[in-house]
Amino acid sequence: MEGNLSTLGYIPLLPLAGALVLGLMHLATCRGRRISERIYALVGCIGPILSFLLAVNVFFALQALPAQSRFLSHQAFTWFSVGELTVSMGFLADPLSVLMLLFVTFVGSLIHVYSIGYMAGDPAFGKFFSYLNLFLGSMLILVLGDGPLVMFVGWEGVGLCSYLLISYYSEDRGNVVAGNKAFIVNRIGDFGFVLGMAFLFWGIGAEGFDYLSLKANAHLLAPTLGITVCLLLFIGATGKSAQIPLYVWLPDAMAGPTPVSALIHAATMVTAGVYMVARFSFLYAQAEVAGLVVAWIGIMTALLGAIFGMFQNDIKKILAYSTVSQLGYMFAGVGVAAYSAGIFHVFTHAFFKALLFLGAGSVILALHHRQDIWQMGGLKNKLPITYWTMLVGALALAGCPPFAGFFSKDEILYSALAGGHTGIWAIGVLVAGMTAYYSFRLIFVVFHGQPRDREAYDHAHESPKVMTLPLIVLAVGALFAGFLNLPAIFGGHLQVSHWLAPSLTEVHPHGSIATEVLAIGGSVLAFVIGISIAYRRFATGGEQPVFTGFRKFAHHKFYVDELYDTVLVRPYRFLGQAVERVVEPFVTDGPVRAVAWLYRMAGLAFKVIQVGYVRVYAIYMVIGLSVMSLVLSQSLNF
Amino acid sequence: MIATYLFFGLALLSVLGALGLILFRHPMNSAMSFVVTLISLAGLYALLSAKLIFAIQLIVYAGAIMSLILFIIMFLNIQEEDLPVATGRWFFLAGGIVVMAPVAGLLLKIVKSLPGDVEPLTDAGFGGVKQVGLVLFQQWLLPFEIVSILLLVALVGAVVLAGKRG
Amino acid sequence: MIEHYLSLSILLFCLGVLGVISRRNVFVVFMSIELMLNAANLGFVTVARLHQSMDGHVLALMVMAVAAAEAALALAVVILLHKHKGNLDTNIFSLLKG
């Protein structure tokens, strides 16, 4: 059923090898030897670019196969074998994973190239590229893995790299705290993921714990167990993909360098949760309750993220909440069983969100690391390429036809409406309007009107070509990617959805033309309203508003972080201190020390014999001799 | 007959000397008693037909070693007040007698098993220089050489120790 | 006859041990050790007479040589001790105290 393609193993291996080489090179320079940035850049970018070329090769190999049997796999080595279970490090290339593979390597390569410009002059240039390559390698393992265990290897790997890269500027304590927060919150989600995997194995894992075997045996899974597994796996996804209640790490993760935010926290890592749900579509299709839970949590997260995004003043935080919101859309999509729509939104989102982040990075760099939008303004003329590409990105994000975001978002909303989830559709339309509002608030405040900080404005200049070229490429993608999945009403054939069909257990909804028109109309109306409100308030420049009441509440993110701190973090820390003060002295530390004390006392007791006077030692000898002779004279018979 | 009287006399002298050694307070007195013991022991060696040993005992032990000890005692100029006040002396002595009793008992028991009479000597030169020399330089050559090295070591050691300042 | 000599040897040996145990003066301790060596010598010579062999005499010579070497070194040490502490009491030297 599946053919073997040994080059699959090289796709994650190349960036991982690059990470190792770069790491060694960086360590070699710690004693003062310098390696030029060009060499680091060359070694750092060659891995991702080669992986992209290999991915294209795999795509064509897959296309050559007939539609129903598009599976290529490769078992690299046997990882472990316990009892009757044998797990190998295997890779599976089917339409779903190849789609993910293509845009992950493509966007990843572009961001690597961009980082050459953004991180220029940084003393740990090599370390950055090493971590970035390591991340890409882990993400590729996640995407290409042929079973949940291999995916989990990549899952943990990207979590680690996220931590390493968020706390990259480690001199500042706040950055390290943010990295810790990301890792710990991820870990909480991973606990759910591991439990889900365990239950899944318990249920149907006996005959093979890879996707194809699980899919074949999925019907054997008891319904309640299936729902439990789906919900537990989704808990892992809430951690990794920043949904309620574990989204709190993503805005703090903006402490990392901007290319990191673009790659990890916009385009690739955070979409791993959506990919996971799509991968397990054969489970979610059987457990509709779980799907509904996923969809509702997703759409509520979308709403929450949009509300927060409307009232933030930091350019990266606006984009971070926007990512949370868009991820909510994706989960809403896969929750209502529109898996291909959700994955398609992942695909387009990667382009325009990465574009927006990279553009924001360009602005930040031009203004010498300033991130408050109320200190910007009028940059349209000074940073033309950045402005036009970001405009394209914002239009795509806001869902303006014919940009990519419109088609993918519309597909999700139409599926929701056609599936009967009117509530989800309505909230989705509301969020679309808010999305348009905050994305254009950003554009108008940053690029239009009068410059608010004259001195910074005068020193600003356009970024070098190594940074603007990726922006242009991504803008082209954001513009045209939507046409890959045009619905019939626009004359397209839903190519992507059909291409993904062998990987997913999906039933396409068949709604009437009226439903389609309603969906499209709603989206367009929301976009128009949102952008016009933003235009009226900010296009001619505006001053930073003072937030009061509800706005202030939203600006402070509904005080959720403080809530978590009080309800969860502090009691846990208190518990830890209580253990240290109570349990340790009496249960663990105390008895061990008591035993040691006992030995010392015994030693001290025996020390009395050694008085130090040689005469006394001679007396000991004589006493010994006397005792011996007593014994001997008893036993000898003369 | 004479031998028996001589033996008991000399034995008594040696025991008295030993007692003096362990009982006198001033080390000079102890040393002098010890000399008495050594000389009487030399006499006992002579009674046992150990001519060479008798001579060597007088020359080396009573002559060289004891004079060295006496010299050092006089050199250090020990006054009455320098001597340690040994308060527990009798207690230690009594205890020592108690402890040594089994040892002595065992040894005496072993000794009693040996034959009591001695045969008259067949060899006229028994115990003389020639006889001892023959045995010393034939069977006991290696120990002899090693003892000479030992004496060298002692010599070097004494020089090193004497050269220490403070 | 022989057992008389050997009993005397044993007696002298025990007196030597008593001297080591009960006296605190360094010289007396040293001379008690010499007394023990002499008692051993007497034993050697007696048994040599018993067996009519020279080995005992040779051994007695060895013992005397060793005693001489030991006397030289011990007295050098005694002088150093006296220089160091000014006292000849063995109870003062307790650096070996555990």
Image: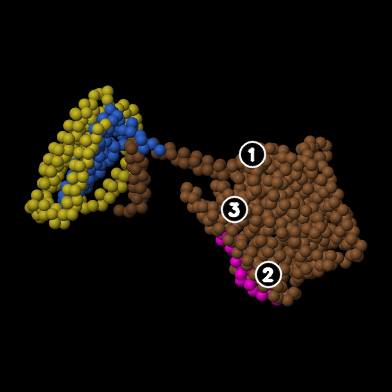
Chain colours: A brown, B yellow, C blue
Residue B66 screen position, x and y as percent: 17, 36
Quick check: marks 2 and 3 in contact, CB under 8 Å?
A: no
Instruction: Report the residue at 88% width, 67% height from top.
Output: A510
Q: In the rendered image, which residue does mark 3 sit on?
A: A116
Q: Amino acid at mark 2?
A: Phe
Q: Residue at x 90, y 59 (%)?
A: A518
Marks 1 and 2: which is nearer the front?
2
Q: For the residues tagged 1 and 2, is the chain the same?
A: yes
Left or right position of B64 against A411: left
* Residue with the most extreme top position: B81
For the residue carrying disc 1, how many other residues have a C-alpha within 10 Å: few (<14), some (14-19), or many (20+)?
A: few
Sequence-earlier tag: 1 or 2? 2
Q: Which comes before the other along the chain, label 1 or label 3?
A: 3
The alpha-carbon separation of the residues under discs 1 and 2 comes to 60 Å
> Subunit of mark 1?
A
Residues rendered magenta in the picture:
A1-18
Query: Is residue A85 one of those drawn in magenta?
Result: no
Determine which residue is flagged by label 1: A581
Kindly state the secondary structure of the residue where label 2 is placed: helix
Residue depicted at 56% across the width and 61% down the height: A17
Report which residue position mark 2 lands on. Answer: A59
Residue B92 lies, in percent from the top left, at: 34, 34
Q: Foreground residue, A236 or A514? A: A514
Q: Label 2 vs label 3: CA separation?
A: 28 Å
Query: Label 1, label 3: how many angstroms apart (C-alpha)?
Result: 50 Å
- Whether residue A234 is visible here, answered yes or no, is yes
Q: Give whichever of discs 2 and 3 has the lower sequence position.
A: 2
